Structures are given as C-alpha cells and as structure tokens.
Amino acid sequence: MSAELAEPASKIELPAHVGGGGEIPTFDVTMRVRRYNPEVSAEATWDDFRVTMYGTDRVLDALHKIKWEIDGSVSFRRSCAHGVCGSDAMRINGRNRLACKTLLKDLDTSKPITVEPIKGLPVEKDLIVDMEPFFQSFREVMPFLINRGHEPTKERLQSAEDRERFDDTTKCILCAACTSSCPVFWTDGQYFGPAAIVNAHRFIFDSRDDAGDMRLEILNDKEGVWRCRTTFNCSEACPRGIQVTQAIAEVKQAILSRKI
Amino acid sequence: MQVHKYDVVIVGAGGAGMRAAIESGQRARTAVLTKLYPTRSHTGAAQGGMCAALANVEEDNWEWHTFDTIKGGDYLVDQDAAEVMAKEAIDAVLDLEKMGLPFNRTPEGRIDQRRFGGHTRDHGKAPVRRACYAADRTGHMILQTLYQNCVKHNVEFYNEYYVLDLLTVEEDAVREDGTPYKQKRVAGVVSYDLASGELHVFQAKSVVFASGGAGKVFKTTSNAHTLTGDGMGIAFRRGIPLEDMEFFQFHPTGLAGLGILLSEAARGEGAILRNSEGERFMERYAPTIKDLAPRDIVARSMANEVREGRGCGPNKDYVLLDLTHLEPAHIDAKLPDITEFARTYLGVEPYTEPVPVFPTAHYAMGGIPTNITTEVLQDNDTVVPGLYAAGEVACVSVHGSNRLGTNSLLDINVFGKRAGIAAAEYAKTADFVELPEDPEAYTIELLNIARNGNGDEKVAVIRKELQDTMDANMQVFRTADTLNQVLRDIASFEERYKRISVQDKGKRFNLDLLEAVELGFLLELAKVMTVAALHREESRGGHFREDFPERDDDKFMKHSMAYKDEHAPADGTGSAEAIAGIRLGTKPVVFTRYEPMVRKY
C-alpha cells in the first residue's frame, strides 16, 4: 500500500537552469545499413546514408529520416518508438539494441553507425527477420499460469515478497535482443534461447503456479538451460535491464535441487 | 488470392482483440488478424492502472466509479454503458488475476490499488484508491497476460496481416413503422499479407473490430507509429458512421517535445505540476483534487499556463512534473519505467530535477458506434448483424467527451470479453453471408493507386503537414477559424495525395506502400474529427472551443454521428469543398440516473 505523503509546497524556488532545455545541437552522421531483398538480389549489401540529426534523436529517427526522405525501400519494423513494444531490436555497431532506445549522441558519430538485422533468425528483408522460430521456443515453455486448485471467488493472495521473486522476468517484451545475441543460439537454432527461459522463469517462480516441475523438465532437455555457456551477452543486450543470466542460473539451480 | 473461412474473425490483437479471442476461441472457430505481432500492440504502452471498485484498501463501490466516469466524460457518456463497465470491472480485474497477471500487492497479499485522476470517493469528495496496477507497466502486463492465455488456448493468429476492407452486403428491409431501408450484413474482411504482398479474403459469420486508435493524425502523440485509425477508416468507407470523433484526449504529461507518455500514476503517487514560477498551479484550476483532476482539465490548465507566459525552458513552451519531494525508493518501486524514459530521452534525473512535460495526443473517445453488447450500429438504432467493435476503435460510449485514466484498460477488458462472447454466440446460429463478387477488387484498386502512382508528392511530407496543422489548430484550444484552416489544409492534402508515389515497388514487406495506405486513413479521419469539431459549437470535456467556451446542454447534449456520403452537399459552414462528402447526424445520450451538473473538481 502506498505510504501517506505530506502535501508538497504550493510554491517553490526553481533553479534558473531547471528542466534542461537550450538549443538542441545538430550533427551529420553516416548510417551504414545492411540491405537484403531476395526479390532484387540474393546477395546482401551495405548502403551508406548521410543524414543531419539532432542531439535528442535515436537510431530509429535516423532510419525514419532515410526511409521518408531518401530511400523508401529501406525496411524495418517499429511501432511504439519508446522501448516497450519490442519491434525494433537490431544490431547497432555490433551490439543488439532497440533502435528507439539508442540515442545517436551516445554512439561514436564520427564513424559510420552500422545497423544490421539481429543474428540467428532468417532475414526476410533488410532489417526484418522471421520471428516465428523465436515465438515457437516461447510457446514451448508453457508461458502461462497453470493452477490446479479451486478458483477462489476473489483474487488469489500473494505476498509482496512472493510477487517480487519473479518481478524482473515479467519485464520481458519479447524483442529477441537477448536470444539473438547468444552465441549458442547462433550455432544451434534448436536451443530455446534466453528469452524462452526468462519467460519460463516468470512462471516457475510465481507462487500461484503449479506447473513449475513440468517447465523444469522441458528446460532440462538437451536443448534447454544446460546449453547456456554464461557469456552474459543476453544480460547486456536486454533493453529492459532484466538480469537474464541470473534468471537462467536460478532455473538451473531449481532443476538441480528440484526446489523452487 | 486465397480465401479462408472462419466463424469469427477478430481484427487487431491488442487488449480488446485478445480478450475477445480468449472467449471466442473457446466457443467458435476463430482467427485473429493483426498488422503487427500481438505483443507489439499499443495496449502494452499503457502504464498506470485499471480501475475497479474492489475496495481492497479503502471504501469504494462501483456506483461511485460509474458516477466518476459519467462526470469525467462531461455527461456525454451513455450511462447504461458506464454502469456495465463499472460493475463488470471487478470481475475483469479478477479474471486477469486468475489468468496470471502479476498485480502489485498489499501487505495482506490482496491486489493493491492507487489513486488516479478523476476517480473519487462518494461523488467527488476526495481522491480514492481504485486503480489496480503492476508498477507502471500495467498495460504491458495485461498485453502479455492476454497473449499468454491466447497461447494457452491455441488461438490462431495471422500476424502481419493488414486488414484493408470490410466486406458487407446490403439487403432491402422495412422498419417497424413501414419505412424501407438498406440492412447491412457482414460477410468478411480482406487482408494484405505484409510478408508476401498477397491478398487473403477471410469469410466470416462474425467480424470483431479491435484495431485501436488514430493518434497519428497528430504530431505530438503518445501513440505508436502504427496507430493510424485503419479500423475506423475501413468501417467509415463502407458506410458505417463514426460517433463523437471531435473528442480526442490530450494526456497532460507527455515528455516535452517528444510526446512519450509519463503516466498519470506519477501524480497518483504524489507528483505535482509546477509552472516557471515554481507554483503548483492546479490549486487554482481544481481546488479540491488539484493535480488529480481529469486529463482534459489538467491539459487545458497546462496549455493556459504556457499561453500566459508561465511556461518553462528557453522557449517557455512546457511545464514541469515535480517528483523531487518523493522518496527515490518509492519512485523505484512504483514508477520505474517512466523515470527511465525521462533519463533516456531527456537526460533528466527525476529524483532531483523536475521533468519537462506538455500535453500529448493520447486517445480517441469516439469511434465505431456500438451498443452495450458491442454490436455495431449502422445508424442510431440499426445493428449490423455479425459486426462487433471493442476498445479504442469503438464508441460504446463509456468515455463521453473525456476518458478517465485507467478506464481504457478497463474498456478493452470488459467490452473485449463481451465482444468475443457475442460474436461467437452469433456465429453458432448464423449462416455465412455470400461473399460479394470480386471481393478483393476494391482493395486491389486501393493498393494500385498507391503502388503505381508516379506523381511528385511524398507520403511522409503530406503526413507531416497534416500532423503539423492538427497540432496547431485541432489541439487543446480550438476556434472556427483554426478548424476551417485544418479543413482547407486537408482539402489540399487530398488533392496532393492523388499524386503520391512510393519508391518501393516490391511485394515483400512493402512498408512504404503500407504507409501510403495508412495516410489515406489518417486524412479521412482527421477530416471527420475536424468537421465534427466545427459543428459542435460548445465546450465539453476534451473539446474546447474558445469561441464557444461554455457547455451548451440545450443544443449539444447529444452524440455526433458522421457518415461518409459522396452525395452529401456542402452545408455552407466552413470550407465547402472539404465538408462535402460527410453527413453529420446526432444520437441521443442514454441517461439512467445521473442528471447533468456543472463539472467542478
């Protein structure tokens, strides 16, 4: 329950600079975009685009500028544009990120910024990959609450501590940044991958769920958690800050101890 | 072209579409078509909460919630619909909990609840804790939970299938009073598979529209790029009216210059707004509930502060959301995502610095008219058998002229569920309506106009100009002059739209073509919104006319109904060429027990 708060002051002195502001600087940057369109050619190529951008712009803004002003055929997925829908995971300067959450000013704009599709999933066109194998792995871990008890008339009770136990893994937006940053996934497309394990974790450690054992059995498979080599790429890639490697470690531990 | 046959086809896989699918999928053969992947839908961006009078933390009841919803909507709410929503809210929250939604909990382990704008105890006496929430990502949790349950129930999705047409037939019919009319019936939809560029016709006994809003008619908006009003546009082009389109909600706290949403939950948790003088100005505009006044009032107050020279920053064009008096631990526990947005996108640390904010286009109160069973209306009284709508695309109308915060997550769950059940039940006894001849002909032409055009106009340029004029002239403050300016602009955009060309001529993931089609819907809807705004010569809820600053119940206590009608003559108001083609009617508001009163907070 929220703490009762003292009423804030009706009027305060604001420091002169408050709220940021000032002129937003502009700069020129070269975007080096991986292009592939099997309707045109079986070969993928790099295209360079020089664009003038603002200090507050993100990689997605640069891609939009290219698409809207220079080359309408440059293709990528995007929707919410502020890091919650998971559409625009891509490989930016060799690292998996969301284009809408990566500010250009945080990259080295003196050199071309490379943008490629995420790895390990079949490329459909330019930055668009086939997400179906990714969602298939997600579906295989039974990513839904299974409760065998009688349904209460009101809500099931859950302590704040029990709720906290799986809080981190509820943040997943299924963008595939983690899974497609995993070297094991690149070489073995059968591996469930970090995102599926994260979503299994979210239910295994939910005190209301009764099917943790079944999920642990699924993840104990040869394509399950034991393929993880703890390279931490996934944790670094997660745009939601989920401690992915730790979640995988907790699942491994639970399999070994058979205790959730 | 391929033809598929389903009992029920649901268009859209956000909260309303998936809530409907969970019901319909267990009762009838159901397909869900979405132009995205389900988890990309904009329900996931909703933050603050979902109200229901659970009374878990303090006294509350659904009748108070009904009253708040009606008063919040400035009495243009259909009161029967508001009662349904507030009453069924409790089960809607419990349904989600049982599906697995990880709500924040009270020390006793119950679902926790917090304050939200316009939600009050005992008819406006004080703010009440009514919003059930999961940190500041309640919408994300709802979207994920519904998707998880769709997976559980093996719901069949067609991802990245963009629906472009509604197939209907018209039959001669006679009303009870003997007057003849044309009865519409639904036969299915036509969709465009983005991956392959192929058309797919879906024949269905029932079609549920749950395709969301149209925020991209504005420049500064919290809405996703993909929210281009397709569902409303498709229905409108096929002769279905659109209700109350002049009412668009501007959420008070968008990140200044960007429009990215900072939840009202911030104010629910104690944050306040300040102007350049450091003053908590909402004390002047809403003395009782101050910063927790409904969104239309707060947004207008902010815009007024800026207009009167008390804005902040180098251009004095925003105000400040102040969280600095809150404990950092409290902020982290209750508002982690939105404080992260302030850091990422503005470089502002909310623990120590106030955050620059300004109203951002957020939510369409209007949409496809339905009754409380979610059946779509082809006029004030006539249902289109087999056609349903729920969520932001629909107007049932529970939001009237201004939606209360959290009531959209509630709307999608209550009416999404109703739509799923109603569509499946209808399909049990109905027969398929025969598809019209060449069902895809209209869609092929629509795509060819965009694909084969070789004019000198660019989609992105026209769209930007549309968004600019809408922000400048159709936003928080409106007058006949500004609205006529929009209509003149749109008339020229429509001419220019005929001369667009898209660069991508391919079939595979041709998103260039998709944007051209979307712009067509945006132009159509912006025009409907503006025409309706011009005709509503009063101020009510989210619609504020500076030339008519008072609410006028004698003349305007009624819904507006806009029909596409190529033969509708210009009526002499405003810009003649732009208004031609739209016929405006009205529909009575449903009253049950609440008399309109002066709306003060």
Image: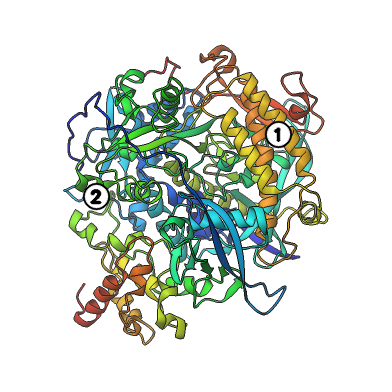
Residue B218 position, x and y percent, is: 57, 38
Residue situated furthest top in the rendering? B554
Tell me the quadrant of the picture where the C terminus of chain A can be found: bottom left
Q: Residue at x 73, y 25 (%)?
A: B177
Tell me the quadrant of the picture where the N terminus of chain A can be found: top left
Q: Which mark is residue A48?
A: none
Q: How many numbered marks are there? A: 2
Does B421 appear above or below A74? above
Residue B463 visible in the picture: yes
At label 2, the amino acid type is Ala
Q: Nearer the viewer, residue B497 or B270?
A: B497
Does B281 appear above or below B204? above
Residue A62 position, x and y percent, is: 55, 56
Residue B51 position, x and y percent, is: 35, 39
Residue under label 2, please give it.
Answer: B333
Residue under label 1, please give it.
Answer: B490
The residue carrying pointer 1 sits among few (fewer than 14), some (14 to 19) or many (20 or more) residues within 10 Å by Cα, namely many
Query: Helix, strand or loop at disc 1?
Result: helix
> Mark 2 to mark 1: distance in Å?
46 Å
- Residue B521, located in which quarter of the rendered image? top right
Query: Helix, strand or loop at disc 2?
Result: helix
Q: Nearer the viewer, residue B37 or A207?
A: B37
At label 1, the amino acid type is Ile
Residue A69 position, x and y percent, is: 65, 53
Which chain contains the residue that carries disc 1? B
Label 2 vs label 1, nearer the camera: 1
Q: Residue at x 47, y 22 (%)?
A: B75
**Pointer 2 or 1: first along the chain:** 2
